[in-house]
Image: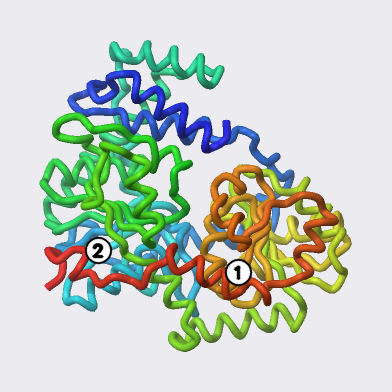
Amino acid sequence: MRREELTQTLAGFEAGHPVGDWIWNGWRVWPAVRAHLALRHHDPEVAPAPRHRLAGSLAWRRERLRRFAGEWLQRGGPPDRAADVVLLSSSDRGERLGRAFYNTVVDPWAEEVARCGGVASVWERGDPRWPSRVPRSAIQRAVDLALRAGAAPGDAPDWFGALAEFVADAFEAEVDWPELGRHLRAVETCARLFEGWLRRARPRALVLDCWYGREAMGAAMAAHALGIPVIDLQHGIQGGAHPLYAGWGKAPAGGYEVFPDRFWVWGAADAESLVASNPGAFGPEAVRVAGHRWLAAWTQRDGDPHRAALLARTERLVGGRRALLVTLQKGVPFRDALVPLVRHAPADWLWLVRPHRQMKVDPAQLEAELRDATGRAVDVRGAARLPLYALLRACAWHVTGFSTCALEALAFGVPTLLTHESGAHAYADLVARRVMWSHASPQESARRLAHGAAGVADACRAAAQRLFARPAELRGLLPEAAR
């Protein structure tokens, strides 16, 4: 089921059922149940898994060794150290800047907290990526140990029958209580772990990079139990078609334990969409325009010497050729659209293909596969090692299914070709403004890409102004956390 259909289906079920009364083990579980369904049934037309012998490759071995070392050598304070703001994120947000990794979603805000005289504590799940420019606490080992000790979920609650009937009718699938129960139990287990840390850290706010993961929901539950406000920090595309950012009805009295209190978004367009897409769930006072601090840093022509070095590396990779950036998405097919398009394009173009951080692919083997299939200059290894924004600064066009990168490209004056049908829906207003185009045929799209961005660069940047506001200061957004 496509994302926009999924959003309407879940919202319709919520409107017709007393989901606010669905309680298990003393907490209102509907947001966690909805997140489980959304992630389980979103676009099952997944790309075929590549048949690469990752375990036998030297690149894979080097990566495992690096991560094993990182587990032991990662520097950073304990997660329960005193802090004004705790920020929870994932290690896959990290990009290498010089000799260290930088979490592009939360590290700019950790630096802003420090600039305002406060103390930020970054909790990072996933495999540690070290060394890091901003100190952080690697929490995945503690989370895994806690989850192993979690109890079985027990018998299904009374409301589960209505849910199972809905899933069978709407998705032609089955929902298994032990599976869903383990998901809910995992949220609870994380909440117990994090409540102890938060009680000792005593932050004035908890900021979540993506509220609907089990660790994030557990952290929100723990924070609410301690009276700590919970903020969702925008990490990607939202809009009226997102099943977890649209279609929410009025919350029950007292609210949901795992749902954010406030939302910090990139720009005015997302703020308006978030409020309009959730009538009765929350009002404009819960949504604040915070800007996109990492994007703002890259759109400036001067600044950090690490960024200057990465831009120089990107220029060497491009070598004066006409470059096009292709961003791949986890679970979204790309070969059927991309390969014929590249074949019909001029032979002297350079295609920089950047897999999503969560895609399990060997860059060297994917590069060889695409070169063999197209007979064109395709680079995956170099593109995977460079920051997204360094690549956008060097490219004439961006090609994707419906990635958030299509929005970010606009800030650099770069238009996007959308190769997936969900892209035309998600970005309908931007397609109408002629800063994005839907893929029609290999021949027609190749002709479109040949025009370059020269004629639309200004229109792209103008469209970006409503999407990405200037970064707001912490004192205005969260005065209780600034000193």
Q: Secondary structure at mark 1?
A: helix
Percent coordinates x, y for residue 16 in the rendering: 34, 19
Q: Secondary structure at mark 2?
A: strand
> Which residue is more in the foreground, 98 or 220?
220
Residue hosting label 1: 385
In screen coordinates, is 35 left or right of 2?
left
In screen coordinates, is 305 left or right of 390?
left
Percent coordinates x, y for residue 329 in the rendering: 60, 50
**Number of other residues with Cα within 10 Å of mark 1, as a class: few under 14, some 14 to 19, many 20 or more:** some
Quarter of the C terminus within the rendering: bottom left
Q: Is residue 471 above or below residue 343?
A: below
Q: Residue at x 23, y 21 (%)?
A: 21
Residue hosting label 2: 121
Counting residues from the start of the chain, the first of labels 1 and 2 encountered is 2
Q: Is residue 167 above or below residue 148?
A: above
> Which residue is more in the foreground, 248 or 26?
248
In screen coordinates, is 81 left or right of 346?
left
Q: CA distance from mark 1 to mark 2?
A: 27 Å
> The disc labelled 2 sits on which kind of residue?
Ser
Q: Is residue 160 visible?
A: yes
> The disc labelled 1 sits on which kind of residue?
Arg
**Number of other residues with Cα within 10 Å of mark 2, as a class: few under 14, some 14 to 19, many 20 or more:** many
Percent coordinates x, y for residue 25 in the rendering: 21, 24
